[in-house]
Image (spheres, helix red, strand yellow):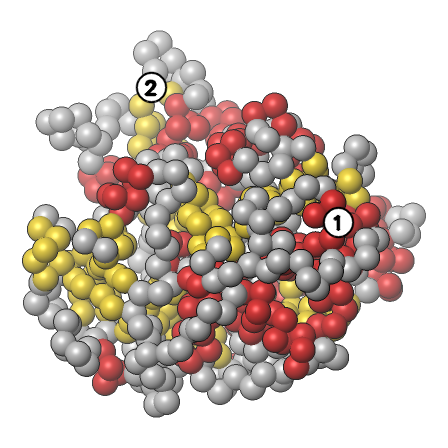
Amino acid sequence: MSAQTPVWAQSYAPGVPLSLNYGSTTVLDLFEAAVRDHAARPALDFMGRTTTYADTADAVRRVAAGLRELGVEAGDNVALVMPNCPQNVIAFMAVLRLGATVVEHNPLYTAGELRAPFADHGARVAIVWDKVVPVVESLRADSSLEHVIAVDLTTELPLVKRLALRLPIAKARASREQLHAPAPGATPWKSLLAHDPIDEAHPRPVADDVALMLYTSGTTGRPKGVPLRHRNLVANVVQGQAWVSGMVPGRETVMVALPLFHAYGVTVSVLLGLSVAAKLVLLPKPEIGLIMDAMKRGVPTFLPAVPPLYAKIVDEAEKRGVSIRGIKWSLSGAMALQADLIERWEAATGGLLVEGYGLTETSPVIVGNPMSKARRPGSIGVPFPDTDVRIVDPEDLDREVELGERGELLVRGPQVFDGYRDLPEETAAAFHDGWFRTGDIVTMSDDGFLTIVDRIKEVIITGGFNVYPSEVEAALRLHRSVGDVAVVGLSNVGEIEETVVAAVVAAEGEQVDVDALRAYVRGELTPYKVPRRVVVVAELPANAMGKVLRREVVELLQKD
């Protein structure tokens, strides 16, 4: 694998090079090139209302001027707490225009989940969905927050839908309350748009600036900031362009069902889409009804998603008689993709569905199946261009294993980050001799295809989201009835999702009320992290050092 021509080169799709030219391009450059060459092309589609590249760029320049007036400067962090919507994309580019850094957050997070990241990144300005303004406002005492800008999603709806929301009927009222809430005291988004566009002479970002920061809890449960530089993100976009060969600038449509607070949603859906001047169909949540409505308006040509979503789409399309034919390329991530789902999807769309792999720290994609009939179900694929991998003995990171032998996947490439924010010890532990440790155990075939066989990092993947057991355990331990707890992911044979399950030992003198405990945790964590099952056990299996043996916990719960 250290030879000049890697073993996986033979498995690349025709026309995909082993090496690419990234130059000194920034994310902003990618967007502005699309604006220059395709100004009249629709850039954003939100529930049927479209905005051209020219109008989107004008909004970006105005919002950048408004943020500058609030004191945002190059190098500052600006928090975005919104679902997928036009304002999120516009704010993203406006922050970059100032040379500042975007910090994306899950808008469904509780104050408890946001508190540590906000204290860490120190953003003075947050652009927030008006429904969650009270949650973000509650962070002021423990953060550097000075300005909260409220975004009303309903202003970006088509006129007919905006008028429908005003009808004096219960259904309209319920729909309106789902999308919007008054945010007195917050600065309205429209006040930023009221500014004159920022002067073209204002300094621009450079490739080595940090463009985006996302937070990952890792195995410790402590939120860790992952700074991704312009050069990291641009590298992954350029790699993606080469991988999904055949995209025609100004002619593609990307369905953005994955959230922008996830690296996969940012890079593969939004940035890759913008780089080819695609129309981005923004879904505020990956709800099947919204997806079907969007499909009726027009079938996308590219749809990045996760296996459960592909399964729901193909099922619902068949049930409703909605055609999804014409989706040429689909790139799946976050969890294993089953062969029967690939077969159903490709039969329904006439396109390709392939599996890829990556991490937040790698911008995120490092491995993918060829976007051709050579894709291999059950495998995560082969390394991207300019991406080198080593498979090593986890107990001796200097010893590479033989082809076909299990080992930890190490990676290096232009998309790999430099290290965690202000965490030198965690950064040192994440790298070995310049190679990033993925924490996943893989095997490699003689033609370079990688297959995940185990995870060192015990992350649970549910619905395409990462759930860190230690974070859920910490929330459960806050309840007085819990003496000890272990959280694991369980999946049934044939299922493609894991379920979050907690094994709980009652505190001395207490009885565990399972329903009350789950209700309590719902107040501490976002819904997908809340254990679906809570099983009360007498004790947790542990080794001689007292460390809980999660594998044995899984076996114990599977017998329950």
Above or below 465: residue 384: below
Query: Along the line of sight, which residue is nearer the eye, 342 or 9?
Result: 9
Is residue 12 rendered to the left or right of residue 276? left
Q: CA distance from mark 2 to mark 1?
A: 51 Å
| Image spot of residue 535 (x, y percent) | 35, 32
Q: Amino acid at mark 2?
A: Gly
Query: Along the line of sight, which residue is nearer the eye, 68 or 382?
Result: 68
Q: Residue at x 24, y 38 (%)?
A: 550
Q: Farthest residue in the right direction?
A: 168
Which mark is on residue 483? 2
Res 176 visible: no
Q: Residue at x 66, y 81 (%)?
A: 37
Res 399 visible: yes
Is residue 551 rendered to the left or right of residue 146? left
Work out whether mark 2 precedes mark 1 in sequence or the reverse, and give the earlier one: 1
Q: Residue at x 37, y 31 (%)?
A: 473
Q: Quadrant of the C terminus?
A: top left
Which mark is on residue 548? none
Where disc 2 sits, the SS reads strand
Q: Nearer the viewer, mark 2 or mark 1?
A: 1
| Image spot of residue 36 (x, y percent) | 67, 78
| Image spot of residue 231 (x, y percent) | 44, 63
Q: Amino acid at mark 1?
A: Gly
Above or below 182: residue 315: below
Quadrant position of residue 22: bottom left
Please name the residue that numbered disc 1 is placed on. 66
Q: Farthest residue in the top direction?
A: 509
Query: Along the line of sight, which residue is nearer the eye, 27 or 400?
Result: 27
| Image spot of residue 410 (x, y percent) | 22, 59
Where disc 1 sits, the SS reads helix
Q: Residue at x 58, y 49 (%)?
A: 74
